[in-house]
Amino acid sequence: METQLANTTVDVNEEGYLTNFAQWTPAVAEAIANSLNITLTPRHWEVIKYLQNEYKNDSPLSIRKIGKSGVVDIKEFYQLFPNAPLKAATKIAGIPKPASCI
Amino acid sequence: MSEFNGEIRKMMIILSKASLENVYAAFVLANGARMEGIEAEIFFTFFGLEAVHKGKLEHLHTATVGNPALNIPTLLGGLPGVEALATSMMKKEMERIDMPDVLEFLDILKASGVKLWACKLAMDMFHYKKEDIYDDLDGIITVGDFYKQGSGLGTHMLFV
């Protein structure tokens, strides 16, 4: 379905994840982050860039992998994206929600 | 059901066994809760304490006797080496699906904000001392303390 984010029309699924990564822009990311009560800092952007790269390389994401990324450790990841960090961070990054239990 | 719409807000998990499959079940459930923004705490009691015992946590085994789902005849399961073989096969499969080993998993749980508690009664019973146990444990507590930890709406308790 379509929705309005940062004055542009984007396609999202029923959970609000972008379904077409080509529609992602930093402004869209800011808008999603706002809806999750997260203010993006340079640290957030580093993590978002990392997640998008992993997505482009078809590399499945998990909390364990984030911890080994060298970009952010698990503790900071939970601080940057409180509550459900992997779900929130991927949503802001415009990539699909990871189907991971670990 | 009215408050939070019946949503789960906190998982209180009691781990009373230390066979690999039970330990992983408890850890995955706790970690999975945190990943969904749900609080999680684990109470290690009786044999579950071995999962946080420094000298033992790296040597946990898969049960090959009394575990019909493994499809090994009970008599065979008790032969020397069978449990070790099943354990090493299990660990290989777990590594393949990106499952951390027990120590690394404890570190992940801790970093994710899971609270880890050792049962005082079981510690006394096994003659374990604080220094025998995983360093980042949140404390050694009684059953009553654990119940207090779990107070509030939306808390669920789970016994493994």
Image (cartoon, coloured by chain):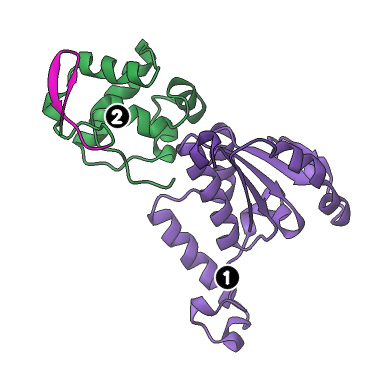
Whether residue A24 is situated above or below residue B28 in the rendered picture: above
Q: Nearer the viewer, residue A11 or B106?
A: A11
Q: Picture coordinates of residue A4 (x, y %)?
A: 17, 20
Residue B157 covered by magenta stretch? no
**SS at circle 1:** helix
- Which residue occupies 62% across, 37% down? B153
- Which residue occupies 43% across, 32% down? A84
* Residue at the spot of label 1: B84
In this picture, residue B59 sits left or right of residue A14 = right
Residues in magenta? A2-14
Question: What is the display colour for chain B?
Answer: purple
Q: Picture coordinates of residue B90 (x, y %)?
A: 48, 65
Whether residue B85 is situated above or below residue B160 in the rendered picture: below
Q: Picture coordinates of residue A63 (x, y %)?
A: 43, 38
Q: Which mark is residue B40?
A: none
Q: Work out whether residue B7 can be spotted.
A: no
Circles 1, 2 touching at the beta carbon (< 8 Å)? no
Q: Which chain is green?
A: A
Q: Find residue A77 and report its image quarter.
A: top left
* Residue at the spot of label 2: A91
